[in-house]
Image (cartoon, rainbow, N blue to C red):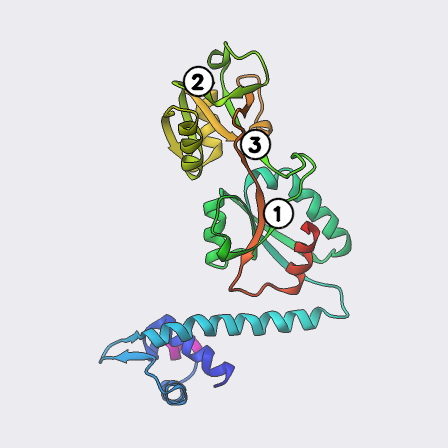
Amino acid sequence: MTLKQLEYFLAIAEAGHITAAAKNLNISQPPLSLQLKALEDEFGVQLFERDKRNLTITHEGLILQERAKAIINLVNETVRDLQNLGAEARGTIHIGTIPSVCNTLLPEKIKSFNETHPHVDFQIFEGNSNHVMDLLEDGTVDIGIIREPFNTSLYHALLIRDEATDDDESDYFAAVGTPSFFEDVPSDAISLEALKGKPLIIHRRYNDVIMNACRQRGFSPNIICQNTEISSSISWAEAGIGVAIVSYKSAVQTMNDKVIIKKIVQPTISTKSFLVWNTDKHIANIVKQFTQLFE
């Protein structure tokens, strides 16, 4: 098995036809067919089901496709890493991030890294945690910054340490709404019970967390909207539709004269942010160096 054979195999798998793959590779069809046959003979398995018009990848072929992509990516990244040794590191780091960290901690980290790595540039993709995890899955970004909960078995994770949060790095949830919703709450904090009966707007990702917390206090919340964007929750709160429950850091960033922000206590509902990357994918050396700023 050679890297060239793996590249040929991936081209065939993507095209679904040897003729189309040969055209994409700018080679003739017979040598490509021979390389595929040699690969199947070496492994002793059939990688494609053949008919007169198309090829259908087999279960064995799907396994090889996944491994071949990983092997070629690793080889390419190794070449780049070796070329950077003894020279000024160059390259691009692709980061997916939730807006609350992108607007606070991330600029500081990038500025610090750029002082020692002036030839490294960044591509930033903002979105909620689910969107960032999708970007990690399809390889659009090298690393992601997301908020718990998430499947910890899928990622290497580093806790985001931020001076703006409390000692345990938690970011607490807050209630955001127009003054009329908080006429009976004079302090800057609010109990969960005080939100009983009020129209609530929440991020779908935190539905279970909020529902369970309310039930533990003996009531079911009046959730009038679930969405997938914190900005939508805050916009609805500003319009006076209801009270948005969002992370305290996200709320503070959007503070304006129209809304009041009150940290939820009794009980406190908290969440943490993490820098993550896929456990089954290799990250380039320059990316590893950047992650070390978060350790």
Give the label on residue 259, or none: none
**Which residue is at 65% across, 55% downward?**
291
Of callouts 2 and 1, the N-terminal one: 1
- Residue 148 is situated, as x and y percent measured from the top left of the image, at 51, 43
Q: Is residue 275 visible?
A: yes
Camera-nearest label, 2 or 3: 3
**Can you identify the residue that label 1 sits on?**
159
**Which residue is at 47% across, 17% downward?**
194
**Which residue is at 50% across, 10% downward?**
184
Marks 2 and 1 sit apart, C-alpha to C-alpha, by 35 Å
Q: Which residues are magenta?
A: 21-25
Nearer to me, 186 or 117? 186
Tell me which amino acid carries mark 1. Answer: Leu
**Which residue is at 63% across, 52% downward?**
122
> CB of mark 2 within 8 Å of CB of mark 1?
no
Q: Residue furthest top?
A: 183
Q: Is residue 29 left or right of residue 7?
A: left
Marks 3 and 1 sit apart, C-alpha to C-alpha, by 15 Å
Camera-nearest label, 2 or 1: 1
Label 3 CA crowd tier, 10 Å (few <14, some 14–19, many 20+): many
Give the label on residue 240, or none: 2
Q: Is residue 246 magenta?
A: no
**Can you identify the residue that label 3 sits on?**
172
Q: Secondary structure at mark 1?
A: strand
Label 2 CA crowd tier, 10 Å (few <14, some 14–19, many 20+): some
Q: Residue furthest left?
A: 52
Q: Is residue 22 magenta?
A: yes
- The quarter holding residue 252 reads top right
- Residue 158 is situated, as x and y percent measured from the top left of the image, at 61, 51
Of callouts 2 and 3, the N-terminal one: 3
> CB of mark 3 within 8 Å of CB of mark 1?
no
